[in-house]
Image: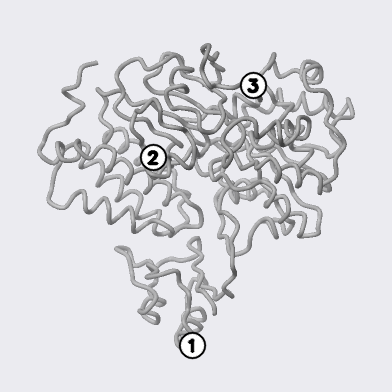
């Protein structure tokens, strides 16, 4: 399984990802993506997810392997 | 706000980091605590784990796990003592660096075993006395790893872990995306360890007095003491040290007691939550979770009954919106909208669905940033909507409960 990662510092809300992946992403009031869940990508949506990653104009999307644990975001 | 207040007799306030002469001098520090024992990195990790030491910068992450992650990277790390303290209501790091800077520098040496250099990241205003001390310690042969001072800008997010790492790498002090953990590879490519200065001071104490001693304070699940910065409607605002689980009333008493009847207390700072002004409420993660709050970095603000909690929260929300680093769309757009919506409610510019809109926006920004700035801001606002629920209803009807309260 993989998961979609949004680099919010790079995303500029062009909206392509939400169009390609309506199952996983909606858009907020300003056009930025809103995850509908934890962004785990079901196998059936992998091709669409890859397309979203490849076509993001801001290069703000990554597909990552799902790992058990993440370190905290702040000290 | 760097005064250290005296604990009244019988209170559960407990001085450790701030015990003794706390004049910041190296000779008094050595007279009081002696030199650090000689330890290797694995021993330091073991001590931190056995003590149950958690980060005192706000997130409360287990220190030993970060130390292990950096050690596992297998390359010389960049080690940063974080004293940026961008939180306006917090003064404990500044107090610690004034009164017991040697404990911080001791702890930095312990965390930096195996590092090429270590960094003390603090506001420029504090640099001169600290540089003098760093030089004196170097001359005395105390610090094997050289310590460099880096100026922390006066900005709320400058103390965020990746922002601190960026500043030390010579970039802007703004948070970074976290796809790659800085403990594996920081902004300069080296594994990077960022620990709050208070955390390091506790580590220096644990190295001398042991995990068992450390655990004698606090609770079984949340051991040790923490520094609290107490302000608002108290007689002697300042910094107090106490074990986790200390009663909120004991902290307020240690700060001279409330100067008027309190309606609520902000715990955990501007990213914290409003809790009832209940004297018996334990200040621990376990007890505060029910209110959406946590001890965080130990910020306690007492709100008097004649002040409006919604107005105060709207003021803080406006400040937090201004302090966004400007990188992430949901934060840049969402926080100002959230703050202005709450401000409308605070100023009784009522319109249908206003509380629901505050709630929607708070949930909308949560989890959608490189750092936890939107999450923390949303948490504070949601806690205010809950804690001041009767006042929300009054404001919608054009009244304010605080306005009628006596001083």
Q: In 3D space, how far apart are the residues under numbered discs 2 and 3 (Cα atoms)?
A: 26 Å
Respond whether the residues carrying marks 1 and 3 are from the same subunit: no
Q: Return the chain for callout 2.
A: B
Task: Name the side, left or right, on which B302 lies relative to B98.
Answer: left
Number of marks in the rendered image: 3
Question: Which type of secondary structure does the marked residue at label 3 adopt?
Answer: loop
Q: Return the chain for callout 1.
A: A
Displayed quadrant of residue B401:
top left
Q: In 3D space, how far apart are the residues under numbered discs 1 and 3 (Cα atoms)?
A: 58 Å
Respond whether the residues carrying marks 1 and 2 are from the same subunit: no
Q: Nearer the viewer, residue B132 or B247?
A: B247
- What residue is rendered at 20% in x and 17% in y? B406
Residue at which label 3 appears: B18
Within 10 angstroms of label 2, few (less than 14), some, or many (20 or more) residues? Answer: many
Within 10 angstroms of label 1, few (less than 14), some, or many (20 or more) residues? Answer: few
Q: Nearer the viewer, mark 1 or mark 3?
A: 3
Q: Is residue B353 above or below residue B243?
A: below
- What residue is rendered at 49% in x and 35% in y? B87
Within 10 angstroms of label 3, few (less than 14), some, or many (20 or more) residues? Answer: some
Q: In 3D space, how far apart are the residues under numbered discs 1 and 2 (Cα atoms)?
A: 42 Å
Respond whether the residues carrying marks 2 and 3 are from the same subunit: yes
Residue at which label 2 appears: B273
Q: Nearer the viewer, mark 1 or mark 2?
A: 2
Q: Can you tell which mark lies on residue A47?
A: 1
Q: Return the chain for callout 3.
A: B
Question: Which type of secondary structure does the marked residue at label 2 adopt?
Answer: strand
Q: Are marks 2 and 3 in contact (CB under 8 Å)?
A: no
Q: Nearer the viewer, residue B65 or B177?
A: B65
Task: Name the side, left or right, on which B277 lies relative to B101.
Answer: left
């Amino acid at each position: 399984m993989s998961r979609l990662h949004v680099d919010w510092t790079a995303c500029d809300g062009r909206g392509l990802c939400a169009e390609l992946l309506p199952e996983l992403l909606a858009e907020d009031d300003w056009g930025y993506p809103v995850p509908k869940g934890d962004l785990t990508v079901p196998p059936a949506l992998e091709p669409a997810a890859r397309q979203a990653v490849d076509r993001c104009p801001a290069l703000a999307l990554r597909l990552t392997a799902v790992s058990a644990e993440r370190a905290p975001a702040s000290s | 706000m760097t005064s250290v207040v005296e604990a009244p007799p019988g209170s559960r306030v407990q001085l450790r980091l701030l015990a003794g002469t706390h004049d910041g001098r190296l000779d008094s520090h050595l007279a009081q605590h002696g030199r650090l024992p000689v330890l290797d990195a694995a021993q330091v990790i073991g001590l931190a784990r056995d003590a149950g030491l958690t980060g005192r910068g706000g997130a409360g992450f287990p220190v030993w796990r970060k130390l292990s992650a950096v050690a596992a990277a297998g390359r010389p790390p960049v080690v940063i003592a974080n004293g940026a303290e961008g939180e306006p209501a917090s003064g404990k790091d500044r107090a610690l660096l004034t009164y017991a800077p040697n404990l911080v520098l001791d702890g930095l040496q312990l965390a930096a075993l195996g590092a090429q250099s270590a960094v003390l990241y603090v506001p420029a205003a504090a640099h001169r006395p600290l540089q003098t001390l760093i030089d004196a310690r170097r001359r005395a042969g105390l610090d094997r790893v050289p310590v460099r001072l880096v100026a922390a800008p006066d900005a709320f997010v400058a103390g965020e872990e990746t922002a601190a790492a960026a500043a030390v790498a010579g970039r802007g002090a703004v948070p970074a995306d976290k796809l790659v953990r800085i403990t594996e590879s920081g902004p300069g490519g080296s594994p990077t360890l960022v620990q709050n200065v208070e955390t390091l001071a506790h580590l220096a104490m644990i190295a001398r007095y042991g995990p068992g001693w450390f655990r004698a304070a606090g609770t079984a699940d949340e051991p040790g003491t923490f520094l609290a910065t107490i302000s608002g409607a108290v007689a002697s605002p300042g910094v107090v040290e106490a074990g986790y689980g200390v009663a909120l009333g004991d902290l307020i008493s240690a700060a001279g007691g409330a100067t008027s009847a309190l309606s609520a207390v902000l715990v955990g700072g501007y990213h914290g939550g409003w809790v009832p002004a209940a004297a018996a409420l334990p200040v621990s993660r376990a007890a505060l979770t029910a209110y959406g709050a946590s001890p965080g970095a130990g910020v306690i603000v007492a709100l008097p009954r004649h002040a409006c909690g919604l107005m105060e929260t709207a003021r803080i929300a406006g400040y937090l919106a201004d302090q966004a680093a400007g990188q992430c769309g949901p934060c840049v757009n969402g926080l100002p909208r959230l703050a202005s919506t709450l401000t409308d409610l605070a100023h009784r510019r009522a319109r249908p669905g206003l509380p629901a809109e505050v709630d929607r926006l708070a949930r909308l920004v949560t989890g959608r940033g490189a750092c936890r700035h939107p999450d923390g801001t949303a948490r504070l606002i949601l806690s205010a909507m809950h804690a001041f629920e009767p006042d929300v209803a009054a404001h919608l009807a054009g009244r304010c409960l605080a306005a009628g309260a006596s001083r």
